[in-house]
Amino acid sequence: MGGRVCRSCLMTLLLLLSHSLLAWGLRIQDYLYFQVLSPGDIRYIFTATPAKDFGGAFSQRYDQIHLVPADPPEACGELNNGAFIQGQIALVERGRGCSFLSKTRVIQEHGGRAVIITDNASDNDSVYVEMIQDNTGRTVDIPALFLLGRDGYMIQRSLEQHGLPWAIISIPVNVSSISTFELRQPPWTFW
């Protein structure tokens, strides 16, 4: 073939890749991207996955909105910083006694526009968890996203180092419209 790419080989490779993602419980369109604008040391585009069977979808893009870590981080009850979450997006930690749906309801009750639930395993840089209903019959209207633990840890660490109460993000971000040269990905995450 002398340097040319076999078209059927390329199509087969793409098909195998999509089947591999399906085997992991993900479809290619199940990723949602957001960009941290501030603090500057984590100014990257992050990948998250939406909840499978609860929560709303992003009906608009937020160009500069606060990503506020919940206090307490697991958001299983009343929040100490609920006033800061109102009208913003909350960063919540997985685990510690309540379901993904319960965490999302707490953020919705505090007026949050969405919730990003980060894995509580801070070394997780590759395995997405499928967030599903908790069989209580409750519903929520705001979007709920799952973020890798390593990404959540790095965002939290940066905020603590800078003494900041929140990050500023844009969400969702259309990565197909960004040139590869400008696409800043976290250096610790494989894309």
Image (tube, grey):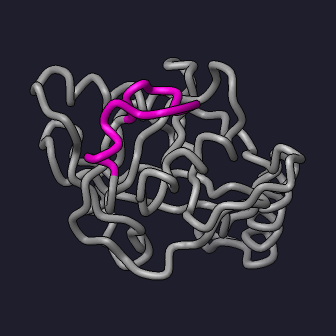
Give the vertical position of 152 relative to 144 (above or below): above
In the displayed structure image, the side of residue 33 where residue 69 appears, left or right: left
Q: In the rendered image, which quarter contains the N terminus?
A: bottom right
In the displayed structure image, the side of residue 134 where residue 31 appears, left or right: left
Rendered residue at 73%/78% (across/down) = 7
Q: Position of residue 68 (x, y in %)?
A: 31, 43
Rendered residue at 72%/35% (across/down) = 99
Does the magenta stretch mainly form a helix, a strand or a loop? Answer: loop
Give the vertical position of 169 relative to 118 (above or below): below
Q: Position of residue 159 (x, y in %)?
A: 20, 30
Given residues 90 and 61, the one toward you in this image is 90
Range of residues picked out in magenta: 70-85
Quarter of the image where one finds residue 62: bottom left
Q: Position of residue 124 (x, y in %)?
A: 57, 24
Q: Magenta stretch containing residue 79, yes or no?
A: yes
Give the vertical position of 74 relative to 167 (above or below): above
Rendered residue at 75%/45% (across/down) = 130
In the displayed structure image, the side of residue 78 where residue 159 appears, left or right: left
Given residues 99 and 129, the one toward you in this image is 99
Task: Tell how many labels.
Answer: 0
Q: Position of residue 108 (x, y in %)?
A: 51, 56
Give the vertical position of 42 relative to 154 (above or below): below
Given residues 17 and 33, the one toward you in this image is 33
